[in-house]
Amino acid sequence: MIYDVVILGGGPAGLAAAVEAKNAGAENVLILERDRELGGILNQCIHNGFGLHTFNEELTGPEYAERYIDQVIALNIPYLLNTMVLDLHDNGALKSIHMINEENGYLIIEARAVILTMGCRERTSGAIGIPGYRPSGVFTAGTAQRFINMEGYLPGKEVVILGSGDIGLIMARRMTLEGAHVQAVCELMPYSNGLVRNIVQCLDDYNIPLKLSHTITFIHGKDRLEGVTIAKVDEKLKVIPKTEEFIPCDTLLLSVGLIPENEITRNAGIVIDNRTNGAIVGELRQTSMPGVFACGNVVHVHDLVDFVSEEAVLAGKGAVNYINGDLASEITFTTSNGDGIGYVVPQQVAIKNVADKVTFYMRVRQVFQDQVVNAYIGDQLIATKKEPKLLPAEMINFNITKDVLAQYPAGEIRFVVEEAR
Amino acid sequence: MYDIAIIGAGIAGSYIARELTRYKLDIVLLDGENDVGNQITMANSAIVHAGFDASATKLKGKFNAPGNIMYEKVCDDLDVPFKRCGSLVVAHDEYEMATIHDLYQNGLKNGVPGLQILFKNAVHAMEPNLNKAICGALYAPTAGIVSPFELCIHAAENAVDNGVTLKTNHLVSDIKNHHGHFEIITNGENVKAKYVINAAGLYADDIYAMVGKPYFKLRARKGHYFIFDKEAGALVNSVIFPCPSKKGKGILVAPTVHGNLLIGPDAEPVSDKSDLATTGERLDYIKENALKNCPDLPFNKIIRSYAGLRNTPVRDTFTTTDGDFIIEESPVRGFINVAGYESPGLSSIPVVARYVVESIVKPMIPNIEENHNYNPKVRKHLRFDEMTDAEKVEIIKADPKYGKVICRCETITEGEIIDVIHRNAGARSVKAVKKRTRAGMGRCQGGFCSPRVVEILARELNVRLDDIMYDQQDSAYILSGHTKSVKEEA
Amino acid sequence: MMKKELTCIVCPIGCQLTIAEKAAGAYDVTGHTCKRGPQYAINEMTNPTRVIPTTVVIKNAMLPRLPVKTAEPIPKGQIFDAMAIINQVVVEAPIKTGDVVVKDLLGLGIDVVATRTMDKN
């Protein structure tokens, strides 16, 4: 059988994309999931705070996932679990997907359109190169989260957390509730990389100190972790001598960033943006390979799942438009990140595919107060986004209407952080 | 009573154990660690040197080149990844070119085949990503790269296949010489043997001191390394050595046999033989020096840093070892030292093991009988990721566990993990699984798969999840207990 | 007049609120962008509460732990008392999202409910 749309990943992006593709008219949709159940990382994110935008209520991760899983089941969308995709090939009109699982063995299926929703993975201690020993007891925050919330194991009892990403903050609370003692959260930057609400409800509520401008300079313990040396850093992020402090602990959790997981994307030859580490995408999340779409954390790391779902709807629509021959391919606009902006998604826009507006997702490089994000085409200011505060931890979504864009034949949309005019 | 006890299951001890099984002997291989090949063998440059640098008057010069030439056969028998990628010693000026000529001449004396001196254009044609200032190089086509711990593990496995008794977690604390046999006291059970081969790596001097008057001392010298993601693996095709100077060999840049890129090592003397801690300054030093030859190193693609130790022999009261291997029957009758076994020990091991067995052990044991059942080959290690599509179809049909990917970064299947647990010299820890299969060695460094590997180990070994260690028995625990204060679970 | 700065945690926007007590029990809240902000700020001043997401032991399911939460926010001061009770709970699969696993937690009139469905193994 040739599938209309095959979705690589059954997490929040994949589920929402599958639902949208089916609702938009794709007949044969298939979800491929490498884990033993649908829902992806949401299954281990048992904390609340999901779904306020999408469902207007505050859900936990598993509840949010279940809303979509229920829709997938109601729509009779088939899925394969414990299935690992090895390769994606472009055969022109059809894509072939090579995959394996225990039940079916080595499978090759064909699809008219493919949506990549593989999510992201955590940066590791190796990637950040902390000096010292390499004992057991050093975990990424997400690994510890899975052990505690799903497997029922406690990784350790005296805990230090490096990095103030949201998973690290959430895990500070989780480990505290499960009886561990979290001594400190150290953050290299002078600001937190997590949402402010998580600092309030996960650290402040439990009197866990957040040490900004601090890093770990040494990992102690030849077999199991015995402690860490932390130190203050200056504005250039260099360690300030004589600020070192030894903290005995048996567990170090790392929450030092997420990286989109694009092995399949890269091997397929799809063009990657080295700012996002995800595929370069258009307004309907089309990639450089015609018929292949991508959405969610595999494109860029989101901080709210609601925006993942929103992006997945675009990809689901795009895939159906593509198989119906209704997807315009001429690119009218590209985007670029000017001063203060780290990246912008989508990186290109085909105006013919835009219904009423384009939402540009972006992140700032540092904390800005009383500044705005301006969008320019050439010298022309075309739109402004105001926020009380611009934080690297909080993704900005910047809507520009089709009416505004349609005034320009083509060009580069440049986003810049500036003083409000 | 064993005929021979080998102390230390690193590359030397494991390989010599295997070589000894060519004869009908009762052999025990002891190691204090929770796995074979867990110290020097685990953390080194992974290079099979061509053999042009050591003096022809030393054992190092004598054994390196012939050892190197045996690698295809050895790695075929033991099913270990090996690549004869060649090496370049690069020169930036005419003074360094003079050194290159000296190395070339020395290489000829050591019998290194195929050496060539290359000039600028030839070097850059061969390696387009090197510093453009490089004006020439010594090219050694026989140099190669190998997975040293897989070589050691498979040698130990093959030794056990051929009848050797392997005892890990047997740390030797004393040896009693009963003149006729030795009694080896360990933190496990004690072992009696007629002959002892001391291949205890960094601790070989301490081990010898248990039976005889010390005549050599081993100094630990630490070397730092970085491993890069496979995305950076193609930056160089061959091993790039800087030109050696009085300061030492310098920082090399090399591909690894699994497609990553490695840079290192420095050489820092340390007093603690278990000091494997990396330091920020030394890691920075490695980066700076590697850039001299490879200016495009992408440091944002680093996936791991680590340190390893060398066991450098130094002269002591009785004899001058002069930085050479110590491979001989010691002044204590029946006690053989294979000590100071630093670089090029890995490259030399096929020949050294033969030398130890044929020239040292065999003359000591009267009426030694050949073992006609000796099988030099290990059962094939199936590596799913390297199979053709047709082979993948077949293997999953035969065993569906090969259809379940556990390590996503390296595409390692449950079938492969189960296999290395149940082989001889099998894996008992998460690190042991990682060394054997590469599960956890990829860019996520075990973030996704280590919980799965813990589960598989616990299930296959029929123990609880929190009994599974990362590395050392009892002390390198991964999980401290259950949530909800639950004590026992089904 | 007492004034306090708060970060609203009702949703991930995290508005910076200022609350001032005009008279006993009467508050003036500014900085919010939705109507839940003032209510949150007043609660923080009078009786701060939190939803507790955690797990309980589950038997005969695919996993050994079931995620749960307090159906309503509970007083901050009683979080660890609540955990002590929740930690003793053992449930049997199958469980459906919303199933009550602890009725009337600590006499607060608030239940602890399952936050996912887990089938029998």
Image (spheres, coloured by chain):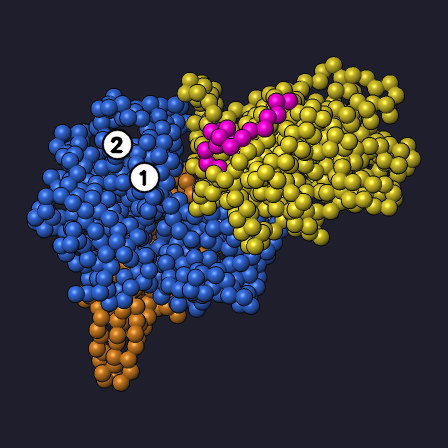
Chain colours: A blue, B yellow, C orange
Q: Does residue B133 appear left or right of residue B179 in this picture?
A: left
Judging depth in this view, the residue of B224 and B330 nearest the camera is B224
Element under disc 2: loop
Subunit ID for the residue under disc 1: A
Q: Does residue A108 appear left or right of residue B366 in this picture?
A: left
Element under disc 1: strand
Rendered residue at 35%/38% (across/down): A262
Q: Name the residue under label 2.
A: A289
A357 relative to B457, above or below: below
> Which of the 4 quarters of the picture holds residue B153?
top right
Density class for disc 2 (Cα within 10 Å; few <14, some 14-19, many ≥20) is some
Q: Check residue B268 for magenta coloring.
A: no
Q: Does residue C91 appear left or right of residue A136 in this picture?
A: left
Subunit ID for the residue under disc 2: A
Rendered residue at 55%/29% (across/down): B118
Cα–Cα gap, marks 1 and 2: 11 Å
Q: Name the residue under label 1.
A: A272
Rendered residue at 32%/46% (across/down): A276
Amino acid type, callout 1: Ile
Q: Check residue B119 for magenta coloring.
A: yes
Amino acid type, callout 2: Met
Residue span colored magenta: B113-130
Residue B239 image offset from top left, x and y in percent = 55, 33
